[in-house]
Image (cartoon, rainbow, N blue to C red):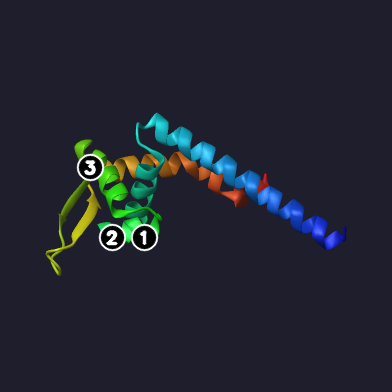
Amino acid sequence: MTTRSALDRKFIAAVDRLGRALRVARQQVATRHQVSLLQLQVLDHLSALGPRRVGFLARELDVTQPTISDALAVLEAKGIARREPDEQDARATVVSLTPSGVDLAQTIANELAPLLDVRRKSSD
């Protein structure tokens, strides 16, 4: 086995471990706030990007429109998100966060920030 090949394997293993650790942390935060991992991702996207069409969220999160619609129905029932007809295309629906959804998204971002701030960890 070449040195390059060994390094590649170690790098891939490290990235895999980091990905799993981040997923576990995100799942713990989602559970603590009584949302699913998909709903947490929706909150994150809407917080970062602003209101978006349902179809955009489905494509961006790599799920079907019925799956994203189910997640949005729960977020709506909790008063976290709202769906409204798109002003430019009445056939489309735009999703946005409610004020309590904005607050929840910020709380979640604050809880995950220490995990994502590698600059801080590397300078300790």
Mark seen at residue 117: none
30 and 117: which is toward the camera: 30
* Percent position of residue 53, x then y: 25, 60
| Mark found first going from the N terminus, 1 or 3 | 1
* Distance Cα–Cα, label 2 vs label 1: 6 Å
* Percent position of residue 34, x then y: 35, 31
Q: Residues within 10 Å of mark 2 (few under 14, many from 20)?
A: some
Whether 90 is drawn above or below 29: the answer is: below
Residue 31 picture quarter: top left
The residue tagged 2 is 55
Residue type at numbered disc 2: Gly
Residue type at numbered disc 3: Ala
Whether 90 is drawn above or below 68: the answer is: below
> Could you tell me which secondary element the residue under label 3 belongs to?
helix
Q: 89 left or right of 40? A: left
- The answer to the question of whether label 2 and label 3 lie on touching residues, with beta carbons closer than 8 A, is no
Residue visible at 37% across and 38% down in the picture: 36
* Distance Cα–Cα, label 1 vs label 3: 18 Å
29 and 122: which is toward the camera: 29
The residue tagged 3 is 73
| Mark found first going from the N terminus, 2 or 3 | 2
* Percent position of residue 121, x then y: 64, 45
- The answer to the question of whether label 2 and label 1 lie on touching residues, with beta carbons closer than 8 A, is yes
The residue tagged 1 is 59
26 and 99: which is toward the camera: 26
> Could you tell me which secondary element the residue under label 2 belongs to?
helix
* Distance Cα–Cα, label 2 vs label 3: 15 Å
Residue visible at 27% across and 50% down in the picture: 66
- The answer to the question of whether label 1 and label 3 lie on touching residues, with beta carbons closer than 8 A, is no
